[in-house]
Image (cartoon, coloured by chain):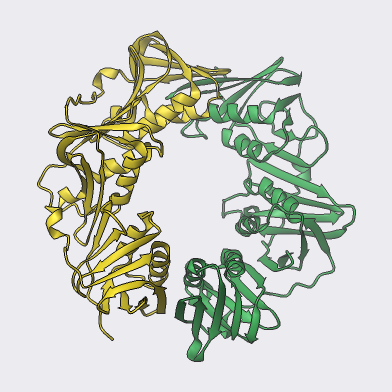
Chain colours: A yellow, B green
């Protein structure tokens, strides 16, 4: 193998595929990046759960392939001058890297042992801009469960029904739903993607209008970003019928400024060292919510002006669940719907159904 | 006590004095910030090694003082709206903090137990701009020893002789010297300031022309920045007569571009996992330095074009010592003076004596 490419493009490619490379495994080859020059020059990272391949523009002088330790290869390329880089595989898997007056010789690993990415062929595809998919993942990912006892909830449901794409995360105390409708696309699949994989994918997606094509097989999902293909395995099992648990009725609706609510809850939670022990209390009355908290350290009382429709109500919440939802909402104002002091609260946009955040309350002592 | 001040100025003050507050001590009061309203409003942090007091503009309605847990006080104030903050001490050390619609009640600690900052009176003062002192500390601090067996070298020597201020750090394998001459000032003191304290002080100093006045007593040094006074204890013991160990003669002098040398040594060190085991080799000849390194992982060869005066020479170094020195040098070009393959190398500016970095070589196998 012998190729010449720009340092900058090579660094971009390495940064992307490194997200799928294991830091420490029992198989040294999985700590490597597969470097292949065929018709195109391609880098691959694969930890068997998440696999990423990325095409990099290169002048291919000689075809071939090699595996180089990811950390070492990445560090060297990033430190090279901003110039043309030559990569050449010699005998015995020796790799030469040259750039201006720098000359490296490294020991590579034969590419035969490297697990190739599965091919996913499906006519069921859904196309969405990188920007929108990035937002949808970001706005639901935080509610993914970390409880390994119920593995299915350590992933997000990605559901495509006709023209509607929905992402759902649930952790037992709260739920995040985000949906979008694309008139030009129609597809049908419903899969659960590991939160860990989505956490890497969201870093690769950029806030640009370029498209991602999503398609899924029985046990894999593919995100195709043109010069880059990301394949994740799926979680097996039945996901919750999330639609059935969203409350349809409510006692009290509150329209509030998102940032004001967020700051007040953040401040009220500052003195709750142990959030499970010390919930924050929402006291909804007339034209305001009093958010308060009482702990061994002290007391906080926050007043937020809001529009209230319905009964006055007192209800307690784990402040973190509100904070994490409010932080990802970009709308200036939100509607909050409270059922009872022991029933769930839902947060929705003023119009439409773009998102729903549902949060279960916690019991509070009524002083 | 009752004061009103701007949130922004209060946050600035807290950020500064927090640098002297212990994160975890056996005395809870040392995890606190002393808040005092006398003629002026003042915050104090003090971990008994480093003490910082900072004046904050405030409308003082009632004099008094209290100690509040530093972390808690800091987090609360930083999260408040950008508005006027009221701090009021009530009965039983209860502290009220109010800002717009936020109301906090916290338990304070009586200020009587808080250690006050020592007063340092000295006619021997040296005045220098914040910017210059910051640079001088930054450019020597990295060479301070971390070996507690020789405590005196865990600090930097700050020496003021007549019009000349010198800062020196030594760790047994290298030395960093930085000096400045101020025609209008003259003072005489020679003290050793703990590296840990300098590490905090360098963060407080800004890149501005405002002055710092330095003065020293028997066992304390004071940095006075106008609205902020920083007092550090000194290290006891005799410092090395550093002048005597700087080589006066050399075999070979090399004039090089600082950034080119730095990048090449950085790259050559990428494959030296254990720097003590694998030094980088400098091969100086005619019009270039070949910097090379050979390890189990591979081999690197870097070529840097330089001006050489004197004999050809091969000498090995711990690359980190060169990298750390070259990173803080702001001059585009440097002179390096090599004595022998077992004698020290010194790095100096092209003109003058603003800095000297001295680095001891390590033995290399001549292949």
Residue B340, image x, y percentages = 70, 26
Quadrant placement of the C terminus of chain A: bottom left
Q: Nearer the viewer, residue A41 or A263?
A: A263
Q: Nearer the viewer, residue B328 or B254?
A: B328
The picture quadrant where one finds residue A47 is top left
Q: Nearer the viewer, residue A322 or A33?
A: A322
| Lateral position of residue A246 relative to residue B31, left or right | left
Q: Nearer the viewer, residue B119 or A132?
A: A132
Give the residue drawn at x 16%, y 27%.
A122
| Lateral position of residue B243 relative to residue B149, left or right | right
Residue A3, image x, y percentages = 43, 13
Residue B105, image x, y percentages = 45, 81
Residue B28, image x, y percentages = 48, 76
Give the residue drawn at x 41%, y 39%.
A207
Q: Vertical placement of A138 versus B9: above or below?
A: above
Q: Is residue B271 visible?
A: no
């Amino acid at each position: 193998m012998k190729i010449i490419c720009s340092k900058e493009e090579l660094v971009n490619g390495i940064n992307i595929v490194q997200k799928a490379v294991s830091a420490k495994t029992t198989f040294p080859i999985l700590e490597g990046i597969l470097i292949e020059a065929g018709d195109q020059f391609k880098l691959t990272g694969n930890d068997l759960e998440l696999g990423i391949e990325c095409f990099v523009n290169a002048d291919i002088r000689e075809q071939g392939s090699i595996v180089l330790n990811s950390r070492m290869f990445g560090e060297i390329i990033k430190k090279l001058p901003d110039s043309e880089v030559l990569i050449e595989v010699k005998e015995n898997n020796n790799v030469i890297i040259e750039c201006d007056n720098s000359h490296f010789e490294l020991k590579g690993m034969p590419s035969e042992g490297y697990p190739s990415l599965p091919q996913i062929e499906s006519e069921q595809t859904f196309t969405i801009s990188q920007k929108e998919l990035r937002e949808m993942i970001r706005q639901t990912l935080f509610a993914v469960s970390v409880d390994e006892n119920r593995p299915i909830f350590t992933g997000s449901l990605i559901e495509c029904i006709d023209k509607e794409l929905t992402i759902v995360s649930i952790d037992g105390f709260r739920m995040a739903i985000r949906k979008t409708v694309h008139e030009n696309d129609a597809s049908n699949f419903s899969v659960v993607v590991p939160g860990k994989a989505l956490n890497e994918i969201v870093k690769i997606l950029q806030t640009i209008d370029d498209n991602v094509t999503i398609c899924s097989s029985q046990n894999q999902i593919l995100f195709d970003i043109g010069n880059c293909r990301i394949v994740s395995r799926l979680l097996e099992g039945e996901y919750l019928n999330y639609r059935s648990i969203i409350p349809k009725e409510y006692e009290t609706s509150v329209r509030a400024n998102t940032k004001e609510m967020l700051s007040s809850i953040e401040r009220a939670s500052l003195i709750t060292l142990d959030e499970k022990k010390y919930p924050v209390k929402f006291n909804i009355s007339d034209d305001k919510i009093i958010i308060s908290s009482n702990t061994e350290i002290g007391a906080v009382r926050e007043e937020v002006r809001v529009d209230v429709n319905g009964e006055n109500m007192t209800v307690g919440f784990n402040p973190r669940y509100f904070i994490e939802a409010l932080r990802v909402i970009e709308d200036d104002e939100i509607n909050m719907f409270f059922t009872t002091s022991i029933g769930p609260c839902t947060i929705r946009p003023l119009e439409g159904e773009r998102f729903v955040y549902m949060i279960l309350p916690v019991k509070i002592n009524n002083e």
